[in-house]
Structure formats: C-alpha cells, structure tokens
Image (cartoon, helix red, strand yellow):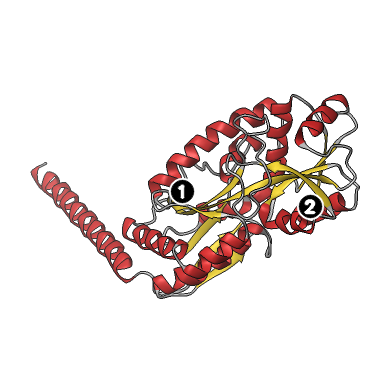
C-alpha cells in the first residue's frame, strides 16, 4: 500500500512539474511574441468591397500604421452576409495581432438584425479603438415634388404608400438610416434594397426611386453638382464643415436624429495586451497623420479625438450603440434572415 501511494505521489509530482514547465513556457512564448511583434505583415480585414467607404478609410490608415509598426499592413476584403463574414473570420483567427478588423456601425446593428449571428460583438473581440465618423445626407430624385424638408414631411405623410426609399441592402447603413427616418416620421415607405450604394445612387439620379439616405463619401459630389438630386438635410446634429449651408434633420424638426457611420478597429479575443498596445499606438499615429487628416476632411468626415481612439472608448461606444439600434430595429420589425 505504501509503495503504491509513493508511486502515485511521484506521478502527481511529475505531472505538476510538467504542467508548471508548460505554463512557464507558454508565458515565455507570450512574452516573446509581445516583445518581438510584429515580425511579419499585418492583415487589416474589411467587411465590404474594394472602393467602398470603409475600404477607402482602411487603405488610408494602413500606410501610417505600417510605418509605426515597422511592418506592412495589407488590406483584405472579406465580403458577404451583410458585413458579418469578416467579423466571423476574426473570431476564428489566431489571437496574435496579425489579423485585425475595421468595421463600421454594422458591429452594433448585427445582433438585432441576425437571429443566428456567429459572434457576439461585446464578448468575442479585443478593442483597438474608434477611428472616424462619416455623416450621411438625405437625398431625393431631382424632380421629387418637395423642395425642402418641411414639404418632404408633409408629402410622405400624405403619400407614404407611393413613396420609395432606396438602400444599399439588408444591414447597410443606408437601410438603418431609412428605418430611423420612417420611425421618427411615423410612416412606412416602400423600401427598395440594392446590392450596394452605387446602384442605389444611380437609380435615384435616374429617377427610378424617390429617396436615399447615404454617406457623404458618396453624396457630396452629387450635392455639389446640384443637377442630379435634391438634398434635404444632414443626419448628424452638427452641419457639415464642407457644406455648412445644408441644415441638419435635427434642427428641422426630427429632434435627436443622429446617424453617423462610425468605425472601429478590433482584434481576436485573447490577443496579448502588449500587442494590443502596439496596435492602439499605430492607430493613434495614423489618425494624426497629415495626409490622413487631409483626405478624411475632403470626404466630409471626422477623425475621432484621442480619448475615443482607445480600447475603452470603443467598448463603451459599442455598448451604447448596440442598445440603441436594438430598439430601433425591433420596433421596425426588420430581420436580415
């Protein structure tokens, strides 16, 4: 009995020593990863197609981020499922900082839109920081009967069954903006989903649809042209610095109306803190880069302040936005499935 007890004790001891050694080795390898990281190219994943607003922002940021990190940052487009394929890819990626994500407010709206979302935005990611906000504008076809927002409100309330509202597809920010517009006006218009913002804008300018709410990165050239569409307002509480004569929807009666396409950067859950610190530093270098600031201003967009370009700044903002859009989407009865 004694010999057996001694044998078991030795085995237990050997197992404990082996476990301790493994833990020590894991800790050392983690420290080694953090101290030498990055040793290869970092991939910045975009949920939407090349040339789109989020892709443009990603490619602007990639250059100064890469310079800060001492490694190339390449942009890859993982498109599909309303922007949910890219976050799902990040969740499955190794948490070593070499695969990260830039995404807009779709991270906050997906939980309410999709019943079987393969990730939880509030639990399955590490947060690098917020990046920028892109305002939106409400446009109509050039021959739409209304000439100002008050006339538009009156017209759609009397003719809501005849008015069409275009969007760039299920889950697109243009759809969400349209949903909030209908919610606050108390109307239900005929929504027309497209496969992207480009086709929706083309049909608006061609007179096939009546209204469209879309990002300034696409609408500013059309507004400045002044011949292809009418503009009724800006979707943020603050007017555009590039076109200050256009009033906001908030100041025209839709109190509290605030839709901006905010963007954030994410990493897989479990990415080492030292690596996250380096990614956050690179992001902050990028948003202070003079070329980035110039190009973003030309797009009538706003880079975030340093206090928002932090893990905590993004986490808190995401929590607020998830709760906000959950109410709007459920009230509208909209689902992506």
Q: Which mark is residue 51?
A: none
Residue at the image position 45 percent from the left and 46 percent from the top: 314
Mark 1 neighbour density, 10 Å: few (under 14) some (14–19) many (20 or more) = many
Can see residue 96? no
In the rendered image, the vertical position of residue 282 relative to residue 2, given as above or below: below
Judge from the rendering whether residue 273 lies leftward or rightward of residue 106; answer left or right.
left
Position of residue 219 in the picture relative to residue 199 (left or right):
left
Q: Position of residue 225 (x, y in %)?
A: 79, 59
| Residue 187 in which image quadrant | top right
Residue on which the image places disc 2: 195
Mark 1 or 2: in front is 2
Which quarter of the figure is the N terminus placed in?
top left
From this viewpoint, which residue is outermost toward the left?
2
- Say whether disc 1 or disc 2 marks the residue closer to the N-terminus: 1
Q: Which residue is mark 1?
A: 125
Report helix, strand or loop for mark 1: strand
Residue lying at 69% horizontally and 27% vertically, measured from the top left: 184
């Amino acid at each position: 009995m004694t010999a057996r007890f001694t044998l078991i004790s030795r085995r237990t001891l050997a197992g404990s020593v082996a476990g301790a050694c493994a833990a020590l080795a894991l800790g050392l390898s983690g420290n080694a990863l953090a101290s030498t990281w990055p040793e290869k190219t970092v991939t910045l994943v975009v949920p939407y197609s090349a040339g789109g607003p989020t892709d443009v922002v990603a490619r602007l940021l990639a250059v100064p981020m890469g310079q800060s990190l001492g490694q190339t940052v390449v942009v890859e487009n993982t498109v599909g499922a309303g922007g949910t394929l890219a976050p799902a890819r990040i969740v499955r990626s190794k948490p070593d900082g070499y695969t990260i994500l830039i995404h807009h407010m779709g991270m906050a709206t997906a939980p309410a839109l999709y019943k079987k979302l393969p990730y939880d935005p509030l639990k399955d990611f590490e947060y690098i920081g917020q990046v920028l906000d892109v305002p939106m504008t409400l446009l109509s076809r050039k021959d739409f009967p209304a000439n100002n927002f008050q006339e538009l409100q009156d017209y759609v309330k009397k003719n809501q069954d005849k008015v069409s509202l275009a969007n760039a597809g299920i889950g697109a920010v243009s759809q969400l903006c349209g949903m909030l517009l209908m919610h606050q006006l108390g109307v239900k218009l005929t929504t027309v989903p497209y496969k992207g913002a480009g086709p929706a804008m083309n049909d608006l300018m061609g007179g096939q649809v009546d209204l469209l709410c879309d990002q300034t990165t696409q609408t500013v050239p059309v507004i400045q042209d002044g011949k292809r569409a009418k503009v009724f307002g800006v979707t943020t509480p603050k007017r555009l610095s590039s076109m200050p004569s256009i009033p906001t929807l908030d100041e025209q009666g839709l109190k509290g109306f605030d839709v901006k396409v905010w963007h954030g950067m994410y990493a897989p859950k479990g990415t080492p803190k030292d690596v996250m610190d380096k990614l956050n530093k690179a992001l902050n270098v990028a948003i202070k880069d003079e070329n980035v600031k110039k190009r973003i201003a030309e797009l009538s967009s706003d880079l975030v302040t340093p206090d928002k370009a932090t893990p905590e700044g993004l986490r808190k903002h995401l929590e607020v936005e998830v709760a906000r859009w959950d109410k709007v989407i459920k009230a509208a009865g909209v689902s992506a499935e």
